[in-house]
Amino acid sequence: MSTFREKAQGRTKQMVGQMIGDEQLVEEGQKQERKAEQQAKPSQAKPSQTKASAESSQAKSSDGPSGQASRR
């Protein structure tokens, strides 16, 4: 299920729980929404990780063929 749908369902459970006075349903909705947010965060971190690995590979490529800086 998509993250957006999970968050929407969690929020809906919270609202219905509040309307009918069911605290357990409110808590269940909060847990579902938090879980969806946690699933969304790792996918957002990927671009920065890719950038960091690209920078480190560029630094290695500027070194000599053995992976060490050439000395002249």
Image: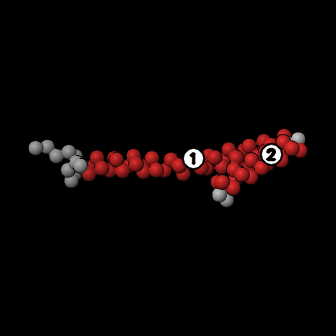
Q: Residue at horizontal 89%, vertical 44%?
A: 20
Q: What residue does disc 1 label?
A: 41
Q: Position of residue 41 (x, y in %)?
A: 57, 47
For the view shown, which residue lies furthest in the bottom direction? 1
Is residue 55 something that shows in the picture? yes
Q: Residue at horizontal 88%, vertical 41%?
A: 21
Dot 1 crowding, Cα within 10 Å, few <14, some 14–19, many 20+: few
Q: Residue at horizontal 64%, vertical 54%?
A: 3
Residue 67 vs residue 3: left or right? left
In terms of secondary structure, where does tag 2 sit? helix
Q: Residue at horizontal 66%, vertical 49%?
A: 36
Q: What residue does disc 2 label?
A: 15
Quadrant (top left, top right, bottom left, bottom right) of the C terminus: top left
Quadrant (top left, top right, bottom left, bottom right) of the N terminus: bottom right
Which quadrant holds residue 17?
Answer: top right
Looking at the picture, tell me which residue is in the foreground, 8 or 50. Answer: 8
In terms of secondary structure, where does tag 1 sit? helix
Residue 14 vs residue 41: left or right? right
Q: Position of residue 24 (x, y in %)?
A: 83, 42
Mark 2 vs mark 1, CA separation in Å? 24 Å
